[in-house]
Every structure is written in C-alpha cells, then in structure tokens.
C-alpha cells in the first residue's frame, strides 16, 4: 500500500488496481473529490485488516493477476458479508459482474466510468456501510444493557441435585409464563432469592421488585403504606403505596401465613380486582400485579384449620413449589460453599485460605439448620480465616452422631467423584460391596442420585 495520511473513515475507499499509472490517477481523482483513498496494486494485500469493524468500502478492478476482483469480493464477503465491494469491469466482463452482483457484490461499473456516477456510487456505498456499523453498535449496546440486568443464578439454585434441577426448570417456567406462585420451605432456604431470580429472568425485570414482610404489616398503617394516599390539594399530591409501586413488576409477599385475617381480605380484593383505592382518592387505581408469596408453614393445612382464607390461598398458589432444606440435598453443599466463598472473596478482595480439617469436617457433617443463610455465614467466616467451632457432645450432637454424619459425607463424596458409579466409589473407599451397600441403606443414600 502506498503511504497516505491517517484515513478519514467517513470517505474511506480501498482501491485495488494492478496498473500502477491507473491506480495513481484513480487515487488522485478520489482525493480531489473528498474521499480518502487507500491504493493497493496487489489484490491479496488489499485483504489486510478488513473485517466487521472496518469503516470503508472497496473499489476493485475485475481483471488482475493472482486473485481477480471476483475472487477478491468472495474473500471479503467471507470476512464481512455486509462490507460493500464495487467492481470496475470492461464490456466483456458484464455478464460475470452481474453474476457477482447476485452473489453479494454491492455494485459494478463499466469502464471507462465518468466521475459523477463513480462518486455517487461510492457515497451510497459509504452511507450503507455507516448504517450497518451503527446498527451493529446499537445491537451491541442493547445486548450489554440486557446482560447487566441478568443476575447469576439464585444462590438456592446452585447445585446438581435432582431437586435443584427441577427448581431451575420451574423457575424458567414461572418467569416465562408470569403466573402467580407460592413458595414453601423452612427459614433460610432461599425463597426470596428465588423470587428475585425469577423477576430478573422475566420480561418485567425493568420494573420494581417489591418485597413485603407480611409479619411486619401494621393493620392501622396498611392503607397509607400499601394502598397510598392522595392529599386534599389534588391528585398530583399523592404518595404511592407499595402495592401500586409493584405494578407491572413483581410483588413478593414474604411469610404470607402471618397476614392477619382482616388484611387477608383486603389483599384478596386487590389481587382479584386489579385495583387499589388510595386514601383520599375519588376512584380506584388500576394495578398490574404479578404476585409470588412464600410461607414457612404448610399453607394448605392452615386453610384446613381455618387460619387462612381458602380463596386467597387459591389465588396465590397458581403454582406451588417446596424448596428443600440443605440437609435434604447435601451433595449441593460443596458447590454452594464454593459459590459463597468466591462471591465474598471477589467482594472483599480477599484470597480464601486453605480449608482446615476442622472446617472440612464441619462442612461435611453439619446439618445446616439455618440453610443458605448459615452456610453463607460459614463461607464468609472461612474467608476471614476464622475456623469453625466443632460441635461438642451435648451441644447439638453426640460423638456417635458426628461420626455417623462424617461417614455419610464420605460416602456422598465418593459417589459424587465417581459420578454415581458404585463400583468406582467402593474402590475409592476400599470397602467390600456388602459393607458399601449396607452403609448406603443406613444413611438413606442412593447412588443413582449422583449420576
């Protein structure tokens, strides 16, 4: 390529012509017309640095030694099918050029070509190129914005147990369908985390996620805090309630079993009518609600006992999902632990220390009654270099119970490492087949769960 100034990408034209005198004349003419020519006498060299981000167009002769203009256009099309290539052809090459046009060449001009048509074609091609690049930038920016709204899987969904695989599939279904759901499970199993994850996957993710602790609702403040108020000065002087703030987003009702009977009726009315009536308003306000509720208790049993309204229960339980405690999916504990450790280490800039025997034993044998919250706290303690306190007999578990838990943890680890292959797990543990299966039965472990 001949020496040129830094190219003006607004009028960048790569010229390909094997006749040196003609190449120089064409370059001079394009420069005088306001373009920025890049002259190349060898067609193969003209492929240098072309690609999806290159901002110009290519103007090439057809008949050249080595690879001709038709082949050059095909190679450029492989680099970026939307990069405009204009061919200069003799009268005998018109049929060939028409075929090239069908194959994706932007345009062709027959020689000798006058200045006006050439410049007009180049400007059209450059405008088309700018539009292509701008559209690509917009799509990239949109994708980056969408990526920022996506969150990593909910903490409770980390793992490979059958229950967690089912929960991941169900979460995708709820997010896509936008149906009301009821989550059941012990404290700390991740009910709110799951609801936030579903919201982040749904088309409503750009609208608010509003969490309401039902046990903390004061009946005398329900209207003002949850339905909103309108001041006497006019409708523009109003406070939006939390329920209306969740419109077109998600309303998460945490601990719905704690909602007093009177407020159960009020909440049912809001959900059924799709309206709220702020204090001081002359008419109700429409709301588009997507409700996910959670309960630590069996809500169906609460309904049967007369402690919870059956009509509200059926409104909330379009899909009911029970989240398992950690003790029911012990094979997921190591994955969750690493997940919490990595997140805490990234947040604090710390490097996790080697896992001590005491910490490893605690991780393998503890029942985690606090579920995800307790495991997350343990991971943070570990990252800070603080060793777990072992459970002493009489303070939660006897020595025999601790030994039994550790044995079960070793069996699970061996099966996990063997991918559920019982023979390989026996070899790892160096125990006979009968002993191995007796211990599996004793601890309620199934090798198939690890495949």
Image (cartoon, rainbow, N blue to C red):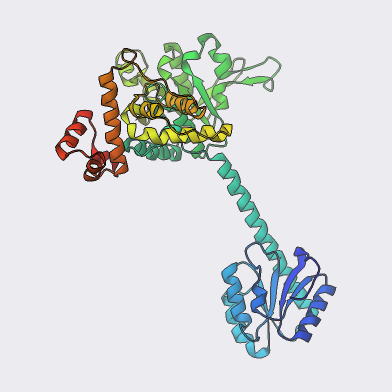
Figure check: 8 above or below 174: below
Q: Is residue 73 left or right of residue 343?
A: right
Which corner quadrant holds the C terminus? top left
Residue shown at the point (67%, 57%) measured from the top left: 134
Numbered-mark total? 0
- Give the image quarter of residue 225: top right
Q: Residue at x 37, y 31 (%)?
A: 319
For residue 393, side relative to residue 290 (left or right): left
**x, y (%) of residue 198?**
46, 35
In the rendered view, tell whether residue 437 sits above or below residue 19. Answer: above
Residue 179 appearing in the image: no
> Residue, x 59% and y 85% (percent of image)?
96
Q: Please name whichever residue, 338 or 23, is drawn nearer the observer in this view of the structure.
A: 338
State the residue lying farthest toward the top. Answer: 220
Q: Quadrant of the N terminus?
A: bottom right
Give coordinates of residue 304: x percent, y percent. 29, 16
Quadrant for residue 358, please give it.
top left
Can you see residue 304? Answer: yes
Of residues 258 and 190, the one drawn nearer to the viewer in this rendering: 190
Image point 38% across, 37% down: which residue? 159
- Determine the image quadrant of residue 283: top right
**Which residue is outermost to the right?**
32
Q: Residue furthest left?
A: 434
Q: Residue 450: x percent and y percent?
A: 29, 40
Q: Where residue 11 appears, x then y in whole percent?
A: 77, 67
Drawn side of residue 132 relative to residue 167, left or right: right
Q: Which one is nearer the viewer's eye here, 160 or 193?
A: 160
């Amino acid at each position: 390529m001949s020496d040129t100034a830094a190219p003006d990408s607004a009028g960048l034209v790569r010229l390909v012509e094997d006749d040196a005198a003609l190449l120089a004349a064409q370059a001079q003419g394009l420069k005088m017309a306001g373009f920025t020519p890049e002259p190349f006498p060898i067609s193969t060299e003209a492929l240098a640095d072309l690609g999806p981000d290159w901002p110009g167009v290519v103007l090439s002769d057809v008949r050249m030694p080595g690879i001709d203009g038709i082949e050059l256009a095909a190679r450029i099309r492989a680099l970026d099918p939307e990069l405009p290539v204009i061919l200069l052809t003799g009268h005998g090459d018109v049929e060939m050029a028409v075929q090239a046009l069908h194959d994706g060449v932007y345009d062709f001009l027959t020689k000798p070509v006058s200045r006006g048509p050439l410049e007009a074609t180049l400007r059209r091609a450059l405008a088309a190129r700018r539009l292509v690049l701008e559209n690509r930038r917009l799509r990239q920016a949109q994708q980056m914005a969408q990526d920022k709204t996506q969150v990593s899987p909910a903490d409770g969904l980390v793992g490979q147990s059958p229950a967690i695989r089912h929960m991941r599939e169900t979460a995708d279904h709820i997010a896509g369908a936008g149906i009301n759901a009821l989550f059941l499970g012990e404290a700390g199993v991740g009910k709110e985390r799951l609801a936030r994850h579903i919201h982040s996957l749904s088309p409503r993710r750009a609208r608010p996620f509003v969490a309401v602790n039902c046990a903390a609702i004061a009946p005398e403040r329900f209207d003002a805090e949850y339905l909103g108020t309108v001041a006497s000065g006019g409708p523009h002087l109003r406070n939006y309630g939390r329920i209306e703030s969740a419109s077109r987003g998600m309303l998460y009702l945490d601990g719905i079993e704690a909602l007093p009977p009177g407020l159960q009726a009020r909440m049912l009315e809001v959900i059924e009518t799709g309206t709220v009536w702020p204090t001081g308003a002359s008419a109700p306000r429409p709301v588009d609600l997507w409700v996910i509720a959670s309960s630590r208790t069996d809500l169906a049993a609460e309904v049967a006992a007369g402690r919870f309204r059956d009509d509200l229960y059926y409104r909330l339980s379009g899909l009911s999902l029970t989240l398992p405690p950690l003790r029911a999916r012990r094979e997921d504990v190591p994955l969750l632990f690493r997940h919490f450790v990595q997140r805490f280490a990234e947040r604090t800039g710390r490097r996790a220390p080697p896992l001590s025997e005491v910490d490893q034993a605690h991780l393998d044998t503890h029942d985690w009654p606090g579920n995800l919250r307790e495991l997350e706290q343990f991971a943070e303690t570990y990252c800070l270099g603080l060793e777990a306190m072992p459970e002493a007999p009489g303070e939660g578990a006897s020595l025999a119970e601790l030994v039994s838990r550790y044995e079960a943890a070793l069996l699970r680890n061996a099966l996990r490492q063997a991918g559920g292959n019982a023979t390989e797990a026996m070899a790892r543990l160096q125990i006979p087949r009968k002993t191995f299966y007796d211990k599996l039965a004793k601890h309620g472990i199934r090798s198939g769960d690890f495949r």
